[in-house]
Amino acid sequence: MSLTGLALLDAFIFERFLIEVNEFNLNTDLQPSDRIKAMQISDLHLKSVQHYHQKLYKKITDLKADILFFTGDAIDDNQSLNAFDAFLQLLSPSIPKVAILGNWEYWGEVNISQLRQIYERHNGTLLINEHKLYIIKNRTIAISGTDDFVGGKANIEMAMPEPVACDYHVVLNHCPQYSEVIPFQINKRCLSILFYQGTRMADKSNC
């Protein structure tokens, strides 16, 4: 299987007119049209939909992702729920979206039930120490999403209760410190893991 990772970082939070795109090609054996393109969006801290979010939407559209990963800190408070709903409405409903929580969803006491419903309304799934299978381009991807290590109760054992039959397994995790712990907690599993965390995509590793 080939999976291409595109990480859209939160550079525009600091320089609001800059969107940084990092591309990771894990396997170049397949033709570009046969590769699965996964896009990561992290640390939006969205409060209202501004023109730079429109630029982000255009970038997502231009890159033609097969699946989107939201890796935490999408919003900071309940007042931003409607704005985040409006942002997701910009994105194509045909693209599956997989999300996890970050520390700010907890620190801001975001209503997790409402946030989950918003994701579901836009072909999305919020994973909190859970996993889900997706079939994309006739290949199976297992995605495990951990709770936030700082604000929540991260538990990779719950997110990966047993080895899953799949072509590739992706772990979504917000906290970089927890990404250092995860390989030791799953070291008995024969899986090829790709970590998407916070504001970067970690290296592919074999367990």
Image: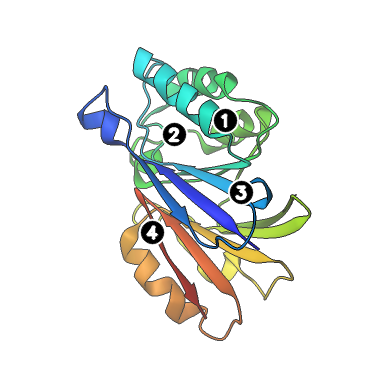
The front one of 188 and 4 is 4
Q: Residue 89: which quarter of the image?
A: top right
Report helix, strand or loop for mark 4: loop
User: How packed is label 4: few (under 14 Cα within 10 Å), some, or many (20 or more)?
Assistant: some
Q: Are marks 2 and 4 in contact (CB under 8 Å)?
A: no
Instruction: Return the residue at label 3.
Output: 32
Dividing the image into 4 quarters, which one contains the N terminus? bottom right
Report helix, strand or loop for mark 1: helix
Could you tell whether 63 is left or right of 181 in the image? Answer: right
- Residue 122 higher or lower than 67, as above or below: above
Please say whether residue 206 is visible from this viewpoint: yes
Q: Are marks 3 and 2 in contact (CB under 8 Å)?
A: no
The location of residue 20, given as percent across then percent down, is: 32, 37
The nearer-to-camera label among 3 and 2 is 3
The residue type indicated by label 3 comes to Pro
- The extreme left residue here reads 14
User: How packed is label 3: few (under 14 Cα within 10 Å), some, or many (20 or more)?
Assistant: few
What residue is at 27 percent from the left and 35 percent from the top?
Answer: 11
What residue is at 66 percent from the left and 39 percent from the top?
Answer: 96
Q: Are marks 2 and 1 in contact (CB under 8 Å)?
A: yes
Q: Earlier in the sequence, mark 3 or mark 1?
A: 3
- Residue 111 higher or lower than 36, as above or below: above
User: How packed is label 1: few (under 14 Cα within 10 Å), some, or many (20 or more)?
Assistant: few
Mark seen at residue 149 = 4
